Image (cartoon, helix red, strand yellow):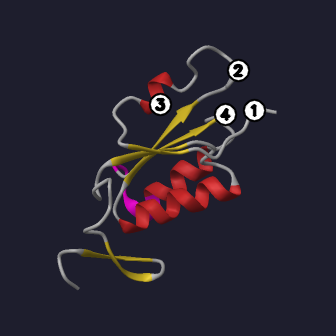
Amino acid sequence: MSSNEATGAYGAVGYGHLAVPLGFLVLVTGASGFLGSNIVDQLLSIGYKVRGTMRSRERNSWILSLFHARYGKNAFELVEVPEMAADGPFDDAVRGTSALSKRSILL
């Protein structure tokens, strides 16, 4: 494998063309849902660090344990956003990130 490739779930992935270099922090909203958790897993598997948001950290602590066991404690962190309708609910979560994957909706 060359220095411009990473091994992910789908084999070797070239990353010389990525707008956000591997190792940078990516925010994934709705990280405890089906789509969000799979996006987190894929990003971690190719070498990004990920910050995930969810409404209840307590109810979704399983995801923290899962990704820490798979990728180490420095690869994934959680931020609770209990009320998306509040003013600036993602201000703290987005601070310091280089990219965003928005998976949550307000119903």
88 lies left or right of 68: right
Number of disc labels = 4
User: Gap between marks 3 and 1, in whole Å?
Assistant: 17 Å
Query: Which labelled disc corresponds to residue 93?
Result: 3
User: Gap between marks 3 and 4, in whole Å?
Assistant: 14 Å
Query: Which labelled disc corresponds to residue 85?
Result: 2
Q: Characterize the local packing of mark 1: few (<14), some (14-19) or many (20 or more) Cα atoms within 10 angstroms.
A: few
User: Gap between marks 4 and 2, in whole Å?
Assistant: 15 Å
Q: For the residue labelled by badge 4, is the local secondary structure a helix, a strand or a loop?
A: loop
Q: Name the residue under label 4.
A: 56
Tag 3: amino acid: Ala
Q: In this view, does 83 lie above or below 28?
A: above
Tag 2: amino acid: Ala
Q: For the residue labelled by badge 1, is the local secondary structure a helix, a strand or a loop?
A: loop
- Residue 57 position in % (x across, y down): 61, 35
Circle 4/circle 1 CB separation < 8 Å? no
Tag 1: amino acid: Leu
Tag 4: amino acid: Ser
At x 66%, y 58%, the residue is 35
At x 58%, y 44%, the residue is 102
- Looking at the image, is mark 3 or mark 1 nearer the viewer? 1
Residues 61 and 31: in front is 31
User: Gap between marks 3 and 2, in whole Å?
Assistant: 15 Å
Q: For the residue labelled by badge 3, is the local secondary structure a helix, a strand or a loop?
A: helix
At x 61%, y 28%, the residue is 81
Which residues lie in the magenta part?
69-74
- Residue 101 position in % (x across, y down): 53, 48
